[in-house]
Image (cartoon, rainbow, N blue to C red):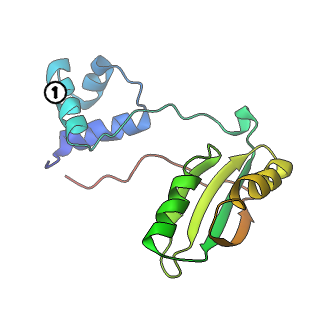
């Protein structure tokens, strides 16, 4: 799907506030409601808009600890990677999981209430996963920037 300037404006508005009504969105992008809705539906059908979410404040929910954990596996076989990925996806504390280049390490980001919860997570959730060779943690001191809106191309 080729995006034009109006599609990009729609995406920008929805990335800023996914709860906009179609009428308000149409007003902001200078369309009437019917064509605006048709464009949104086309963006959804093309997979450009994949879902709508509400972003909760982790601190307000008692999840003030943001930790990056680097995990090295003993084996980098396709089966070992798939098994690890399946197991790590079972944990709600894991917000992101990336397979890194190089030694096929994984980088995960977890949110937890405190250090004691991190210790329990590592000892009770991570270490029982078969094939883990090494676990290294890095704590964040301060969130300098956090955004969910993707940079959009120019029309």
Crowdedness near tag 1: few (<14), some (14–19) or many (≥20) residues, C-alpha within 10 Å = few
21 vs 147, left or right, is left
Using the image as rendered, state which of residue 64 and residue 128 is in the foreground: 128
In the picture shown, does residue 128 fall above or below 102?
above
Q: Name the residue under label 1.
A: 38
Identity of the residue drawn at 43% across and 71% down? 78
Q: Residue at x 68, y 48 (%)?
A: 111
| Picture coordinates of residue 88, whole percent (x, y) | 58, 54
The reply, left or right, for residue 41 in relation to residue 110 is left
The residue positioned 65% from the left and 46% from the top of the image is: 93
State the image quarter where residue 50 is shown: top left
- In percent of the image, x 71 and y 59: which residue is there? 128
Residue 152 locus on image (x, y percent) = 31, 52
Image quarter for residue 135?
bottom right
Image position, residue 67 (x, y; %): 70, 57
Q: Locate residue 123, reporting x and y percent.
A: 79, 57
Q: Does residue 80 appear to the left or right of 45 in the view shown?
A: right
| Depth order, front residue of 152/86 | 86
Q: State the image quarter where residue 107 is shown.
A: bottom right
- In front here: 54 or 33? 54
């Amino acid at each position: 799907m080729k995006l034009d300037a109006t599609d990009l404006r729609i995406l920008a508005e929805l990335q800023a506030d996914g709860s906009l009504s179609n009428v308000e969105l149409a007003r902001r992008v200078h369309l009437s409601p019917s064509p605006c809705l048709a464009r949104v539906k086309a963006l959804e059908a093309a997979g450009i808009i994949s879902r709508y979410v509400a972003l909760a404040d982790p601190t307000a929910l008692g999840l003030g600890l943001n930790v990056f954990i680097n995990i090295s596996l003993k084996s980098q076989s396709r089966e070992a990677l798939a098994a690890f990925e399946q197991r790590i996806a079972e944990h709600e504390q894991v917000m992101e999981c990336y397979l890194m280049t190089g030694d096929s390490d994984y980088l995960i980001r977890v949110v937890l209430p405190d250090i004691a919860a991190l210790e329990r997570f590592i000892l009770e959730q991570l270490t029982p996963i078969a094939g883990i060779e090494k676990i290294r943690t890095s704590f964040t001191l301060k969130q300098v920037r956090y955004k969910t809106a993707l940079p959009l191309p120019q029309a």
